[in-house]
Amino acid sequence: MRPYFALAGLSLIWGLSFVFIKLLAESSGVWGTVFIRCTAGALILLPILWTQRKRLTTPVPWGHLVVIGLFNAAFPWALIALSETQIASNTASVLNALTPVCAGLIGFFLFKKKLNARQWTGIATGFLGVLVLIEFNVGGLFSSEFVGVGTMVLGAMCYGFGSHYVMRFARNTGVVLLSTSSLITGAIISLAAMLVSGTSPAAFTFDQTFWIAAIGLGCFGSGIAYLLYYYLVKESSPEFATTVTYLAPVSAMIWGSVLLDEAVTPSLIAGMLIIFSGIYIANRKAKSRKGSAVEAA
């Protein structure tokens, strides 16, 4: 039963993270949100990494870890925060579920992965879900409405690239080191972006909402959630762990409706179900392969 409780907890945490992102983006800006999220998450994982330092017997691919941090933390989290300045948190969570579909495309075009007809059907179905979600307003994606849906798709693409990059260049790197280095990289990049843009942490709104969102997003959404996810991979299976892809958007819809009074529209639900169908179709054949399941994560 423990894996099921862990899965439920992970889906609730990651679903609630989209609410925290929206709250932080309003008070701290896009890069400020990334900085808070990465810094708080790193503070949770650094003590764990310190206790495991004697296990680091293999060479550490530091250069590759920086690239992974850029595409698994800094860039996608900035794009998600930017998106949530324009769209609801529940819409962002549904679009984020495109990650396995985007991973398939990235694998084909950049990593020479072969896709069969079923996987292409799943990818096409996933993007059909996006069209349904935006009510087929394709023109909006190439105008002022790109910031929102378009930037969320770019964020999912970053995750897709990051997952393949991990499998190619850091497959044997420990989970805690991989996670911690990603968060530290994200913190450094976001701090640099804040300095370049003239944003100062002193400008943050340090009210009660800020601290709740910062602790919830950073410590739980980026620290504890990592541990829960990899606990599921280890104690159950990668396939079981990736089912959080389906549960987190549902959780986000509930949290968004309760906490932010966000509307759950028919197009949002229909788009979500179609995207889920695409994920299932694209990954069904790969379920027996451990490596493919991790990539989909």
Image: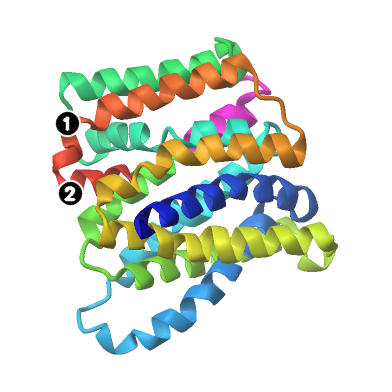
Q: Please provide the residue range marked out in magenta.
A: 143-154
Within-10-Å neighbours for mark 1: few <14, some 14–19, many 20+: few
Residue 258 in picture, x, y percent from top left:
72, 38
Callout 2 amino acid: Lys
Q: Is residue 89 magenta?
A: no
**Which SS type dominates the magenta stretch?**
helix
Give the distance between the C-alpha atoms of the residues marked 1 and 2, in whole angstroms: 12 Å
Q: Residue at x 55, y 53 (%)?
A: 13
Callout 1 amino acid: Lys
Q: Is residue 169 visible in this depiction of the protein?
A: yes
**27 vs 68, nearest the viewer:** 27
Residue 117 in picture, x, y percent from top left:
17, 18
Q: Which residue is drawn at 69% across and 62% down?
A: 214
**Residue 285, label in figure:** 1
**Residue 290, label in figure:** 2
Please tell me whether residue 138 is drawn above or below residue 200 in the rendered image.
above
Left or right relative to 206: residue 113:
left
**39 vs 274, nearest the viewer:** 274
Q: In which quarter of the image is the N terminus?
A: bottom left
**130 vs 30, nearest the viewer:** 130
